[in-house]
Image (cartoon, helix red, strand yellow):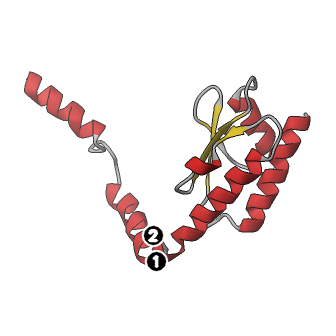
Amino acid sequence: KALLARARRFRKMFGGGMRQAGIIAAGALFALRNHRSRLAEDHANAKALAEGIGRCKGFEVAPGEVETNMVRFRLPGVPAAEVVERLRSRGVLMLATDRLTIRAVTSLMVSAEDIHRAVNAIAKVVEE
């Protein structure tokens, strides 16, 4: 019984409890087959976002550490959930990953123009 309980726990830890895993895998497979060539664009957009955030007063970000399509940053002293809500009200969607840290992800649906809009919205958050 103990061995089976442990095995079930590990199975769930590694995604074995997912329902409809084939549907999720199909989306990933489609992306690998059809969009891998434009991944560099997502990475460039993330780098541009990090550099733009770096120019905004008060925000902490390390553009040199951005190597993929994810950017993590913070506004010290202001809860991440509050910053995320302020950005959402301006049409910019990001995620608070802990009390102070925010994560932004670039993708096929994010253009260079969207990055510019997001940086402007981030700069305005400081003014509030």
Residue 49 horizontal/vertical position (percent): 70, 54
User: Residue 101 bears which disc, if any?
Assistant: none
Residue 44 horizontal/vertical position (percent): 62, 64
Q: Quadrant of the rendered structure where residue 84 is?
A: top right
Which residue is nearer to you in this view: 118 or 10? 118
Q: Is residue 73 left or right of residue 53?
A: left
Q: Is residue 109 above or below residue 121?
A: below
Q: Is residue 3 left or right of residue 38?
A: left
Q: Is residue 118 above or below residue 4?
A: below
What residue lies at 56% left-to-right and 57% top-to-bottom? Answer: 69
Quadrant (top left, top right, bottom left, bottom right) of the N terminus? top left
- Tell which residue pokes out farthest to the right in this image: 127
Which kind of residue does numbered mark 1 sit on? Answer: Asn
Q: Is residue 11 left or right of residue 37?
A: left
- Marks 2 and 1: in contact by CB < 8 Å? yes
The residue carrying mark 2 is 31
Q: How many marks?
A: 2
Q: Secondary structure at mark 1?
A: helix
Quadrant (top left, top right, bottom left, bottom right) of the C terminus? top right
Residue 116 horizontal/vertical position (percent): 79, 60
Q: Secondary structure at mark 2?
A: helix
What residue lies at 52% left-to-right and 68% top-to-bottom? Answer: 39
The residue carrying mark 1 is 34
